[in-house]
Image (tube, rainbow, N blue to C red):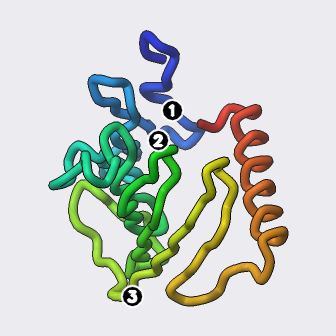
Amino acid sequence: MNVINNPVWKRDAKGNVFTNTYDELNRPLESIVDNGTTKITYQKVIYGEGATTPESLNLKGKPWKSYDGNGETVVSGYDFKGAPISTTLKFTSDCDGLPNWSGSPALESAAYINSMEMDALGRLVSITSSDEKLPKTLKEFLSIILLCFQIEKELNLIGFK
């Protein structure tokens, strides 16, 4: 653990060493696994300060691009309350292995774009998707989000971060 109690590294039963790196503001940057022979950067976050016009898109201090086992997710911008306006996901081409984001793994050419619109109270007003495979009703969508939060909460209780 570092000074503000964020995990820096851990070792699993197989001897793999998991390392987390943080920037000056202690925001997570990379998660790396080292199995003794190779190091793989399996998660990476680039914050909005790296964008060309972060002020106009309200990206400063917020995740702009994130890379994980699914692929690359890019947030086009945030509204005045901090909710993402639109996200674009590109999946990795190799679905069998863990992508190493220290390089440039191949991505699928298809991009999946989701746009959300909130009202002044932060309630979801509309959501659109490029592939139109969204839940049919807002109630169904919110139940999926609630389930995700419950799973995340349970994982945090048993030590996953």
Q: Residues within 10 Å of mark 3 (few under 14, many from 20)?
A: few
Identify the residue at image location x=73%, y=59%: 145
Q: Nearer the viewer, mark 2 or mark 3?
A: 3
Q: Which comes sooner in the sequence, label 3 or label 1?
A: 1
For label 1, the SS is: strand
Along the viewing direction, whichever of 133 and 156 lies nearer the viewer: 133
Residue linked to disc 3: 110
How far from the left and from the top, in percent, is residue 155? 72, 41
- Most extreme residue toward the front is 120
Label located before the other in sequence (2 or 3): 2
For the C terminus, the quadrant is top right
How far is disc 2 from disc 3 in space, using C-alphas?
34 Å
C-alpha separation, residue under disc 3 versus residue under disc 1: 36 Å
Q: Which mark is residue 16?
A: 2
Please name whichever residue, 155 or 89, is drawn nearer the observer in this view of the structure.
89
Query: Hey, what amino acid is under mark 1?
Result: Arg
Relative to 85, residue 122 above or below: above
Q: Amino acid at mark 2?
A: Asn
- Label 1: few (<14), some or many (≥20) within 10 Å? few
Q: Name the residue beneath numbered marker 1.
A: 11
Asked whether the residues under the numbered discs 2 and 1 touch, taking CB atoms below 8 Å apart as contact, a structural biologist would say yes
